[in-house]
Amino acid sequence: MILIAGAGIAGLSLGLTLHQLGLPFRIFERVADLRPTGVGINLQPNAVRELFDLGLEAELDRIGIRTRQYGFYTKTGLPIWVEPRGLAAGYSWPQFSVHRGELQMMLLRILRERAGDVVETDAGVTAFETDSQGVTLALAGGRRVSGDVAIAADGIHSAIRKQMVPDEGEPIWNGAIMWRGTSPGRHFLGGNAMFLAGHDTQRFVAYPLTPEDPATGLATINWIAEMRVDPDRAMAKGDWNRPADKADFLPAFEGWDFGWVDCPGLIRASGTVYEYPMVDREPLPAWTEGCVTLMGDAAHATYPVGSNGATQAIIDARKLGAALRAHGVTRAALLTYEAEMRPRAEGILRANRGKGPDAVMQMVEDLCGGVFDDLEPILPREKLAAHAEHYKRLSGFSVDVLNAQPPIIGPMEPVA
Ligand SMILES: Cc1cc2nc3c(=O)[nH]c(=O)nc-3n(C[C@H](O)[C@H](O)[C@H](O)COP(=O)(O)OP(=O)(O)OC[C@H]3O[C@@H](n4cnc5c(N)ncnc54)[C@H](O)[C@@H]3O)c2cc1C
């Protein structure tokens, strides 16, 4: 029996994978009543390929949109680097923009439909014990469950990671806050496009999560306004659901109407706004203790740079599944998974600390204050292209590499 702590994107993707492989598992989730919390996220083609292999193509099309274009712009809306994404970039699989909570609810519903009653809610994991026989998890309320291996998919505040690394403390904050919301608005830049504008100390990111409604012309636009603030400001480090006051950041974005998109207008049009500090955790020298290993944010919480957090959680799930299939439900399987994924996760974490692909915005700010008629003599396109490609290669979604790669597990048997 495989015990999984957490029914987030990581835990549910693992559950669906283990069901595909016919391996027995149970998921223990702390929250009593899972709700569609969070705002928008992006799924890169390498993760979308895996969700398609799980038979979820139509479900993804129902809850999200296929991202066609991705671009970096200056603080006045001048284009720095704009590239096609997903199918438009030549991938065999699209990139998706989806609401995180709707993705989580979809994965949960499909898992229950396929595998039955495998997710226990109101069942937070508080501790683990491993011995030669396997592992026992202690649950809130005093119950104990035993299995052959346990997987910690319990997010950035993982109780299992805390037991493995007791002195680690709170996530590390870099002094920036992301205010996040969704607003009714028109698509921009030709539709299904994501943009990032500004530089390291102030930026705005937006992308649509739905098509435009034929009746109103309006879509749901996801946006993130980010600024550096006083690092001594008290922050709840890693609470994704903390409501915020627009007055804290709207004034700084008042001038950011680029003509093709009105950033302050989007902020004003949104309902509740949530704030989240830009936090991550130090990479660990090991993820596996006895028959217990870490995955998703429990293993490698990074800055949400490069639209990559949920993607990495899904890839972890598939790699873990492949290792469990190859080595049986054993510690050896957990070590095989860790040996491949831990160095990759550390590389992404360090790249994200250097702002990952987004670093080109600050480069342009440093080189010319974001003012230019022709960017080519200041920052040649060749250099921008190499920078974009470097991050994709590191994260496993370079177009030629991904298209040529064999699947991690392969598609599900068609349901009879
Ligand atoms: C409420 C919420 C909102 C988010 N919103 C965004 C967003 O808007 N944008 C973005 O980029 N990322 C967001 N994220 C993070 C994003 O989902 C992750 O970075 C990524 O998907 C990796 O997923 P994960 O499953 O590892 O972690 P998570 O998605 O954090 O899931 C962890 C799960 O484990 C459960 N859990 C926690 N502790 C325990 C425990 N002790 N025992 C059992 N279960 C436990 C949690 O309730 C949760 O369901 C959000 C996460 C959460 C929890």
Image (cartoon, rainbow, N blue to C red):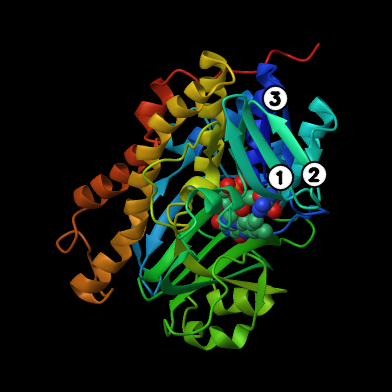
Tally the numbered discs: 3
The amino acid at mark 3 is Met
Q: Quadrant of residue 119?
A: top right
Q: Which residue is mark 2?
A: 143
Element under label 2?
loop
Tell me the CA gap for discs 3 and 1.
Answer: 16 Å
**Residue 6: x and y, percent?**
67, 45
Q: Which residue is mark 3?
A: 1
Viewer-side residue, 155 vs 255: 155
Q: Is residue 202 visible?
A: yes
Q: CA distance from mark 3 to mark 2?
A: 17 Å
Disc 2 marks a residue whose amino acid type is Arg
Cβ atoms at labels 2 and 1 below 8 Å apart? yes
At mark 3, the secondary structure is loop
Query: Of marks 2 and 1, which one's residue comes earlier in the chain?
Result: 1
- Asked whether mark 1 and ligand 1 are closer than 8 Å, the reply comes as no
* Cα–Cα gap, marks 2 and 1: 6 Å
List x then y, in percent, for residue 354.
Answer: 30, 59
What is the crowding at mark 3: few (fewer than 14 residues within 10 Å), some, or many (at least 20)?
some
Q: Is residue 262 above or below residue 339?
A: below
For label 1, the residue is 138
Residue 356 sits in which quadrant? bottom left
Residue 2 locus on image (x, y percent) = 66, 28
Q: Quadrant of the C terminus?
A: top right
User: Residue 265: x, y in percent?
Assistant: 60, 78
Which three-letter amino acid code belongs to the residue tagged 1? Answer: Ala
Residue lying farthest to the left in this orientation: 377
Could you tell me which residue is drawn at 56 percent across and 79 percent down? 264
First in residue order: circle 3 vs circle 2: 3
